[in-house]
Image (cartoon, rainbow, N blue to C red):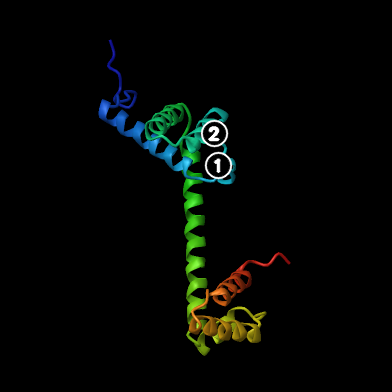
Amino acid sequence: MSKPEDSDVIPEKSKSQKKREALALQDMGTELTQLSEEQLQSISLPEKLYDAIIIAKNIRQHGGQKRQLQFIGKLMRDIDPEPIQLALKAIQRQRAIQTKKHHQIEHWRDQLLLHSSEAIAELAAEFPQLERQYIHQLVRNADQEKQQQKPPKSARKLFRYLQQLSAPSSD
């Protein structure tokens, strides 16, 4: 009678480990319910899981939503979660990049509204297509709106212009 080798024996998971893994899958399912439909469609999900996520997004009652999330976690136990994890991380990275870009545009706008000639020089160096006269006009109008306590229409226009300027061109 021969002994089984140690490398052939797969240790059985404890009940606590199984529960932690199930909760991790349920948490991943909860993350999936936070995504837009476009983002969900970019991830290759089984149809049953996709449908369960869409249903969960539309449930407003706490108890019903909790049961649906548990169901999503159960469905996720039958699939390989690694591709979904990778897709979620990619979406999170993209979101972080967009947030950083948004903050950079806000910073530029704020510097321009403080009449920083350095900000205009910095922008002109980064974006040669910058329309200096238009920026000066928007800054002047924003100042007048602020003094007259009007809504910041020109500051918003300035922000949108900076967004367009920093958007990758499709030339």
Name, please, the residue furthest toward the bottom: 117
- The three-letter code of the residue at mark 2 reads Tyr
Residue where numbered disc 2 is placed: 50
Position of residue 107 in the picture relative to residue 126 (left or right): left
Q: CA distance from mark 1 to mark 2?
A: 8 Å
Pick the front one: 133 or 26: 133
- The three-letter code of the residue at mark 1 reads Leu
Q: Element type at marker 2?
A: helix
Q: Find residue 45 and report its horizontal and vertical position in percent.
A: 55, 35
Q: Residues within 10 Å of mark 2 (few under 14, many from 20)?
A: some
Position of residue 71 in the picture relative to residue 21 (left or right): right
Q: Find residue 30 and report its horizontal and vertical position in percent.
A: 42, 39
Q: Element type at marker 1?
A: helix
| Residue 29 placement: quadrant | top left
Pick the front one: 147 or 31: 147
Pick the front one: 22 or 162: 162
Residue where numbered disc 1 is placed: 40
Q: Is residue 159 above or below residue 31?
A: below
Q: Earlier in the sequence, mark 1 or mark 2?
A: 1
Residue at 38% over, 32% down: 66
| Residue 155 placement: quadrant | bottom right
The C terminus lies in which quarter of the figure? Answer: bottom right
The answer to whether the residue labelled 1 contacts the one labelled 2, judged by CB atoms less than 8 Å apart, is yes
